[in-house]
Structures are given as structure tokens and as C-alpha cells.
Image (cartoon, grey):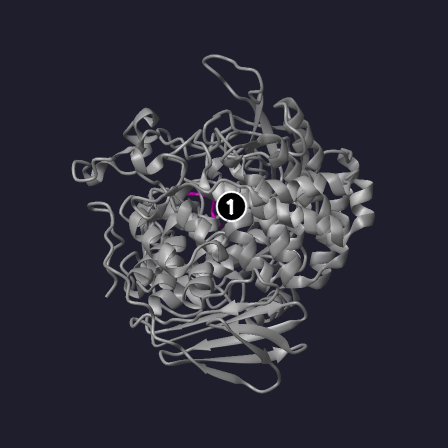
């Protein structure tokens, strides 16, 4: 048993026993999703519940963004994800007593999230206040193969002779939600955002159609049922504005059971009429029932078998981390698998945190994993960015810039953040999108995407940098912007931003030369992309010669240092206890910034520079963001701090399972989960891909006996197995692949390639801020 209530097993997450205080957290952890539809892991009976949640990717309500004092260019409207119609609810009455785990007595009770079947199973023995005993089994899935469909199998078995059971299966809209307060990272609760348009019920089926009050989006939810019971049952159905209910009453004899299979279908649209949307979910529901429960489960297992066959990571030496890695990968897959030209929100579809917005970490953290394991999902996410180019161009024009300015946070492509310093000024999101585009094209060779989307994304993001920066005697400067570190803002020449902008400018120029016909359509001539190369070559890269380290931004190393020794543990995260007035003008780092730049732009720094930079910024980084530990793990591994890399990796992997940031109740940290994959593959595997072929520099910390992973490269699948002394590469399918092992070129063919791992460098000791070192994992 792990220390946080979960039993440790390689392919599942099992919670035994009842802890009502942990509901909000476990509902996020046990959430099921497919990138289009998400169901929080609440109990089938609807109550007790921590935070109800059913989400459709891209479905939101608009809300005004308040300002104490308005300013030109401030966004006027934000977006918040909506908890749509809840179809998970199957209420149970045992005799005349509602089955409610807050009452009576709960016997054996467990919930299991299965990473291979893609289902959430639950088993409970419950004794009512008057002594009636029943056993309940349920299994739930959100289909990867039928993106609009979810299904629940619910079984009730009397344990002490025959009993009268009543089951109420609901569609419920506008559920009451209690919002958590006092933390700006949490989402806003919306008061009854759905307006009823249609409610239909017949036999064991029902449909509810609603629209949002302000954003004008329309959603339909449908349910139908299959009932298996030996005895004769009475069934009723009715529907009203916000509730549709199927009621089943039956006397179940001793030794028998009631089995109800509930099928759900969801759809939403900004354009389709209520009848059309109703017809859409009716069709999806009919298809699901024709497929049937057993086949839905079989297809789910087949989909996941294929995923794990090409993406699994094996961690030998720490069973809890093996479980955590697969948990992380499963949830990243759930966040993006069937998004299909929609964003991947920071919390996926597991909760309303951050109002359901997508940020830059989609491209920088989530898409690397998807690019090398499920490239179609990465392509879909980049297509969503491309579909929002018009809004990004409009935003750039509004702010007096050329090209496109993508939003800091958004659901529909429009800027949804009213906070300038670490929102609008964090223009590195443009370069992050460009980087993900270049990475995807290199790993897949997808010419169709390059022509239809890739070149245009690179061109319009490059145009922003050419407009935003300016040439001076010291080079091309990008002033007054914010990098990834949210404890710094409005700085001159943030190194991360400048390096990524330089890559963006050069990649855009290369794209125009590669696709002259597309460049011509975009009105790019040789003079324009020639300027991009000139600006890239002249980019200012701040460096402190006295200290021998690169500066996070110009002048950063000359700021006064934060008083780490005088900051008690209870004052973290700092943003909740100290004013930004102090944070912005002192040397304190919320999350990896320059360290992240060294990972994404590895050829800019030599090993000595990386080592000095890592040591300098490790002592300033407090990791108040879940995005930090994984990148610190990657660079710690590269420069030789393998023990520290392992501790950072463990922190990244257990961020949600151990609720290290105390906000898992609002949804999981999808980027941190993806960062677990990055820690393994980019950290201990040393994967880099900026030279047109995969390059590895594997190093194994002494806490692990073996690490193995698989990636896709173009049309080939590669398996990498790292042992302490050597690494073996195998070509599982596809054409031979050129790769590098610790800088030496090799060609991987049908024969396995086993190569020695050189000893890791021996860097000087480093330290973290007082009280902020990652927990030592023995």
C-alpha cells in the first residue's frame, strides 16, 4: 500500500476503503476521458460527491473579465468550462432507503482504475441503517473508439434474502456546485449556465438539449438502457427541463441480481440546431447499443493494447514509480487521444481548474509525448492552433503587431486572461507552438500537415517576432516580455524567449524555402525571410561573464536574492503569500525557465555552461509550479546529478497521486503527467531530436535497475532498454533509423544494437533553496 491510500500495482490504481474527505481528490484521479468527453470519478449514486463534473472539450460559457481600471487592449470576455448534463448518476434505493455511503455501514469497498482495460471498476458491500445488505459492482468507460459514447454497467445483489430495489437512472443538468475559494489557480463556478431547449423520453431512453446563456453553444445528452433481471420489473421514464429519469422497481430474490447497462451519448455545436443535435446523439446512442457492452469493452482493450505496445515505459527498481508512470501516460492519453482539432486543457477533462483553459504547456510538455507515441493526437492539437489563426492575427493587430499573437490561456482561441505581466506579455507561447510544429514534422515527416498548417503556423509566429523585436548595436532585442518563470515579468531579453524566437525565425525561413508555393500564398518573399535569418543571427543572449552563467533575463543575476532562509514552509507557494511587487524584482524562480531553455535548445550550450547554469538556477528555483520538477530532472541527469534527477523525477511522477500542490481536487496536472514521460525519455534516456534524427544519451540513476521505453520515429517503432552499463536499441517495425548514442552516429536495422553507457560527468555539488529540495526518495 502506498502512503496516499493507493495499492501499488503495475497496471492499475486501486483504492480500498472509504474516505469521504478524499472524495474531491479521488474524483480527479479516477476520472475517465477520451479527449472529447470527460467524466469525473464520482460515485454512481450521485452522492456523496466532492465536485460533480462532466465535460465536453471546447464547450464553455463566456463571462466578463472585471478590471479595477480598464486599459486599451485588455480582453473583455473570458471563458469557463461548463459542467454539462451529468449522465453518470444511477441512484439506488434498498427497500425505501437511499443507498448513501454517509449512512448505514460500508463493508469492503474498493475502486480500480485499470490502465489496460480503460475502465473504472467499483465494488461495495453496504448495510442500510435498518440492516439490509447489498453488494454493488459497477464498471464505467469513456470510449476511445466511439468518441461521443460512455457506458456504465451497474449490478446489485442482495446478500440477506430477497429485497425490493429501486434504481433511478438520471440525466441531470445544472448540478449545484460548491466552488473552492481563495486560490487564483482554481476555476470559477458558474450558476446554472444551461438553458433548457428540449426534453424527450420514451421506453428506457431520454434526451436533454440545452444551450449556454451567453456563448451560444448547444449541448445534447442522451441515455438508453439494457435491463437484465430474473423477476418482473416496473419501469417508468419522464423528462423535464433539467432532469430525465428512468425508474426501475423490482423485487430481487435471494441468489439473483439486477444488472443495468447504461449507454450515454453526448454532442455539442455552435451552429447546429436543437433537432439536428438531438438526431446526432440519438444516432451515436443507437450505434453504441448495437455494439453492446462487451464489444465496447473489447474495443477499449484493443485500443489500449496498441497504445501500450508502442508507448509503454518499464521502470525496474521502484514499483510505485512504475505505477505512477503508467498512470501519468494513461491520463495524458485520455486528455488528447480524441480531441480532434480541439485544445488540450491544462487539467484535461478531469476537473474545472484553470477554468478549463489550454496554455503553452500543451505544446511544450504534452505534445512531445503524443508526438512520439500517438502522433495523430499531436497533429490534431496543432490543427486546433491553426484553426485559431484568425483570432491570433486579430489579437496581434489589436496590440499593434504583425503576424499572429496566440493567447496565453484560452478555450476557443481568444485570449481569456486579463493579467498582462504573465499573460499577454508571455509571448513565448508563439515560439512554443512553432517548436511543437517543428518537432512534429521532424518526427513524422507529415508533408500534408506541413503544407496545410505547418508552414503557415511558422510564418505567422515568425512575423510576430520580427515586429516585436528590434535591432540595436548589441543585437536583436525582445524587450518587456515574460518568460516561463511566473515570478519574473516584463523583462528585457528573457533568454528562453529569445532562444525559442530564434529557432522560430530560422524554422520559418527554412519552411519558406522548403515550400515556396505556400510561402507565395502567404505573401512571404525572400527579403522577408532573409530578415528573419538576420534577426535570428543577431539575437541577444544575456550572459554574466563575472559569474560565468547565462542570465534568465537581462540583469537578472544582479537582482537582490529572495530571503529563502527567512521564508517558512507554510508561506509556499509564494504567490499566495507575497506580493508580485517583491517576486518580480528579486532573484527567485517559480519554475524552470533558463533550465527549460537548455533542454529545448541543447546545441546552444556546452556541457560546462549547462553545469554552471544548472547549479546557479537550482539554488533559486522553489518549484511552486508543477511544471518545474520534470525539467529539472532532465537537466540534472544530463549534467551528471543523477541522484537529484531521480528525486525530481519522483516528484514529477507523484505530483497528483500525492497531491503535492494541494489542488488535485480541481483536476489533474496534465503537463506534469506528461513531464513524467519527459523525465524518463528525455532525462534518463537523453532523447533530443533537433538534428533531423533521434539522439540518445542514456544514463541510469542507481535507484533504478532498468528503464525501457518505446517511441515512434517516422514510420518506425524503436525500443530502448537502458541498463547501468549499456543500452540496447531494437527496431520493432519499419525502416532502418539513423540515431546517435552519446554523440556517435549509428544505424538501427533488424539487428539489436547494444552500446556501452559512458560514465556520467562528475559535477560540483548543488543545493536547492532552504527547505525546497525535492524529497529524498530512498
Decide whether residue 754 is among the magenta residues.
no
- The C terminus - image quarter: bottom left
Among all residues in the image, which is located at the extreme front?
A: 473
Furthest residue in direction bottom, as rendered: 751
- Can residue 133 be seen in this snapshot? no
Residue at horizontal 32%, vertical 70%? 701
List x then y, in percent, for residue 581: 33, 24
Quadrant where the image shows the N terminus:
bottom left
| Left or right of 594 on screen, residue 169 | right
Please tell me whether residue 642 is drawn above or below residue 38 in the rendered image. Answer: below
Residue 23 in the image: state x and y as whole percent. Answer: 37, 46
Task: For label 1, count other residues whose C-alpha is less than 10 Å away and answer few (under 14), some (14-19) or many (20+).
Answer: many
Residue that lies at the very extreme toward the left in this rendered image: 566
Q: Main secondary structure of the magenta part?
A: loop
Res. 736 image quadrant = bottom right
Residue 362 picture location, percent across and down: 54, 47
**Boundaries of the magenta span:** 44-48
Q: Which residue is labeled 1 in the image?
A: 499
Amino acid at each position: 500500500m502506498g502512503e496516499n491510500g493507493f495499492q501499488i500495482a503495475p497496471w492499475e490504481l486501486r483504492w480500498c476503503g472509504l474516505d469521504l474527505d478524499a472524495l474531491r481528490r479521488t474524483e480527479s484521479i479516477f476520472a475517465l476521458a477520451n479527449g472529447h468527453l470527460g467524466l469525473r470519478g464520482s460515485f454512481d449514486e450521485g452522492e456523496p460527491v466532492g465536485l460533480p463534473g462532466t465535460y465536453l472539450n471546447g464547450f464553455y460559457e463566456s463571462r466578463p473579465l472585471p478590471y479595477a481600471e480598464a486599459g486599451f487592449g485588455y480582453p473583455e470576455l473570458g471563458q469557463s468550462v461548463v459542467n454539462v448534463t451529468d449522465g453518470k448518476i444511477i441512484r439506488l434505493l434498498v427497500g425505501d432507503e437511499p443507498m448513501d455511503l454517509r449512512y448505514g455501514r460500508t463493508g469492503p469497498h474498493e475502486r480500480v482504475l485499470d490502465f489496460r482495460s480503460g475502465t473504472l471498476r467499483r465494488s461495495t458491500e453496504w448495510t442500510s441503517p435498518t440492516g439490509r445488505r447489498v453488494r454493488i459492482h459497477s464498471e464505467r468507460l469513456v470510449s476511445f473508439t466511439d468518441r461521443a459514447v460512455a457506458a456504465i454497467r451497474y449490478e446489485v445483489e442482495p446478500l440477506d434474502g430477497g429485497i425490493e430495489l429501486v434504481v433511478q437512472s438520471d440525466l441531470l443538468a445544472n448540478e449545484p456546485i460548491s466552488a473552492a475559494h481563495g486560490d487564483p489557480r482554481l476555476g470559477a463556478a458558474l450558476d446554472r449556465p444551461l438553458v433548457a431547449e428540449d426534453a424527450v423520453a420514451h421506453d428506457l431512453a431520454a434526451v436533454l438539449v440545452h444551450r449556454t446563456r451567453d456563448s451560444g453553444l448547444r449541448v445534447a445528452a442522451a441515455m438508453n438502457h439494457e435491463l437484465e433481471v430474473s423477476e418482473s420489473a416496473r419501469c417508468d421514464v419522464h423528462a423535464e427541463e433539467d432532469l430525465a429519469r428512468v425508474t426501475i422497481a423490482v423485487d430481487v430474490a435471494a441468489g439473483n441480481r439486477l444488472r443495468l447497462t447504461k449507454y450515454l451519448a453526448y454532442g455539442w455545436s455552435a451552429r447546429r440546431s436543437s433537432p439536428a443535435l438531438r438526431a446526432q446523439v440519438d444516432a451515436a446512442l443507437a450505434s453504441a447499443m448495437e455494439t453492446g457492452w462487451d464489444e465496447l469493452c473489447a474495443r477499449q482493450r484493443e485500443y489500449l493494447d496498441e497504445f501500450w505496445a508502442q508507448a509503454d515505459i518499464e521502470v525496474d527498481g521502484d514499483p510505485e514509480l512504475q505505477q505512477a508512470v503508467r498512470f501519468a501516460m494513461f491520463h495524458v492519453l485520455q486528455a488528447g487521444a480524441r480531441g480532434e482539432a480541439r485544445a488540450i486543457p491544462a487539467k484535461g477533462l478531469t476537473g474545472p481548474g484553470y477554468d478549463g483553459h489550454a496554455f503553452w504547456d500543451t505544446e511544450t510538455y504534452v505534445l512531445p509525448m503524443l508526438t512520439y507515441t500517438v502522433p495523430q493526437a499531436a497533429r490534431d492539437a496543432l490543427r486546433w492552433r491553426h484553426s485559431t489563426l484568425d483570432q491570433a492575427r486579430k489579437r496581434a493587430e489589436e496590440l499593434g503587431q504583425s503576424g499572429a499573437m496566440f493567447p496565453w490561456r484560452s478555450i476557443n482561441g481568444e485570449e481569456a486572461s486579463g493579467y498582462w505581466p504573465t499573460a499577454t506579455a508571455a509571448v513565448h507561447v508563439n515560439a512554443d507552438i512553432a517548436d511543437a510544429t517543428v518537432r512534429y514534422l521532424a518526427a513524422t515527416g507529415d508533408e500534408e500537415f506541413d503544407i496545410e498548417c505547418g508552414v503557415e503556423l511558422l510564418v505567422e509566429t515568425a512575423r510576430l517576432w520580427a515586429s516585436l523585436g528590434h535591432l540595436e548595436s548589441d543585437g536583436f532585442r525582445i524587450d518587456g516580455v515574460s518568460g516561463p518563470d511566473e515570478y519574473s515579468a516584463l523583462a528585457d531579453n528573457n533568454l528562453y524567449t529569445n532562444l525559442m524566437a530564434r529557432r522560430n525565425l530560422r524554422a520559418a525561413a527554412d519552411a519558406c524555402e522548403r515550400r515556396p508555393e505556400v510561402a507565395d500564398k502567404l505573401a512571404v518573399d525572400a527579403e522577408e525571410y532573409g530578415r528573419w535569418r538576420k534577426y535570428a543571427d543577431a539575437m541577444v543572449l544575456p550572459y554574466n561573464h563575472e559569474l560565468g552563467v547565462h542570465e534568465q533575463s537581462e540583469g537578472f543575476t544582479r537582482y537582490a536574492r529572495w530571503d529563502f532562509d527567512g521564508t517558512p514552509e507554510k508561506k509556499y507557494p509564494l504567490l499566495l503569500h507575497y506580493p508580485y511587487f517583491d517576486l518580480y524584482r528579486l532573484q527567485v524562480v517559480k519554475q524552470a525557465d533558463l533550465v527549460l531553455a537548455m533542454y529545448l535548445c541543447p546545441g546552444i550550450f556546452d556541457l560546462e555552461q549547462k553545469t554552471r547554469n544548472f547549479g546557479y538556477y537550482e539554488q533559486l528555483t522553489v518549484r511552486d509550479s508543477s511544471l518545474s520538477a520534470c525539467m529539472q530532472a532532465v537537466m540534472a541527469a544530463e549534467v551528471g546529478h543523477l541522484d537529484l534527477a531521480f528525486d525530481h523525477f519522483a516528484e514529477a511522477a507523484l505530483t497528483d497521486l500525492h497531491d503535492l500542490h494541494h489542488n488535485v481536487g480541481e483536476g489533474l496536472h496534465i503537463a506534469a503527467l506528461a513531464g513524467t514521460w519527459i523525465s524518463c525519455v528525455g532525462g534518463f534516456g537523453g532523447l533530443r531530436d533537433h538534428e533531423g534524427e533521434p539522439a540518445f544519451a542514456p544514463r541510469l540513476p542507481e535507484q533504478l535497475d532498468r528503464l525501457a521505453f518505446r517511441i515512434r520515429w517516422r514510420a518506425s517503432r524503436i525500443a530502448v532498454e537502458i541498463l547501468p552499463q549499456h543500452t540496447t536499441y531494437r527496431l520493432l517495425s519499419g525502416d532502418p533509423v539513423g540515431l546517435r548514442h552519446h554523440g556517435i552516429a549509428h544505424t538501427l536495422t533488424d539487428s539489436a544494437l547494444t552500446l556501452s553507457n559512458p560514465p556520467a560527468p562528475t559535477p560540483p555539488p548543488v543545493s536547492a533553496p532552504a527547505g525546497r529540495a525535492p524529497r529524498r526518495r530512498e
